[in-house]
Image: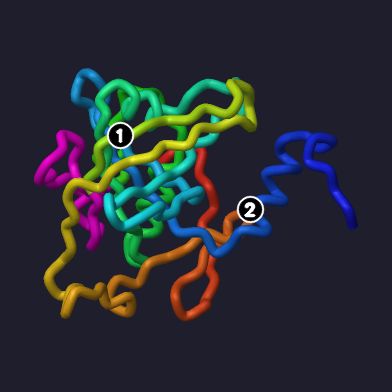
Amino acid sequence: MEITPEHLEWREAYKLLVGSILPRPIAFVSTVDANGIANAAPFSFFTAICADPMMICFSPMRRGTDGSKKDTLVNIENTGQFVINIVSEDMAEKMNDCAVEYDSDIDEIDLSGLSKETSFMVVPPRIKESLVHLECELDQVLHFGEQAGGGSLVIGKVIHVNIHDELYEKGRIDSEKLKPIGRMAGNTYTNPLGSMFELIRKTEVK
């Protein structure tokens, strides 16, 4: 089958992307707004760029309802800082709780039952349950459309890395101890052993 993306409605194009590019690592991004209210949200359009300087990027899409920017992007543009919290399997449920679209004055970290800890070099807090934290300063943001289905590329410079001691040996992270998860299509996730499980996207956390 031959498909020309410009002939597709954006949701159909999205399904092609997430069904083709997988498994995808998850950037669980913590930020703060101008009033110091914390925000946390997961993004599965996420990867490394280079090691020197240490650069990463992730892509928050526009809201599918009205094309507005998500709180994570707004906060990063306003403050220039964020933390990537790597998601281990045992915190997957609470990460999924933070995917709910709440009003900007809601602190998803507190609401989900996750814990904050003070970052080493940036203002946004780290999520304590995460075993690896990448503290970042914003390098640049590239925007691609202002409509639903559009998105932005957030490029950040990693200025500090925090790793739990038991994971780090001889300059390497033990992935078996980290137990990271990846995003498949739909509500399906996977772990390093290839086992798949589902996390249904919620509309609210009860």
Q: Quadrant of residue 23?
A: bottom right
Q: Secondary structure at mark 1?
A: strand
Instruction: Tell me the number on the disc at residue 138.
Output: 1
Question: Foreground: 136 or 10?
Answer: 136
Instruction: Tell me the number on the disc at residue 18.
Output: 2
Residue 36 colored in magenta in the image: no
* On-image quarter of the N terminus: bottom right
Residue 118 colored in magenta in the image: yes
Q: Residues within 10 Å of mark 1 (few under 14, many from 20)?
A: some
Instruction: Tell me the number on the disc at residue 117.
Output: none
Question: Could you tell me what secondary structure mostly forms the magenta stretch?
Answer: loop
Bounds of the magenta span? Answer: 113-134
Disc nearer the start of the sequence (1/2): 2
| Residue 89 point in image, percent of width and height | 37, 67
Relative to 51, 102 lies left or right: right
| Residue 179 point in image, percent of width and height | 35, 72
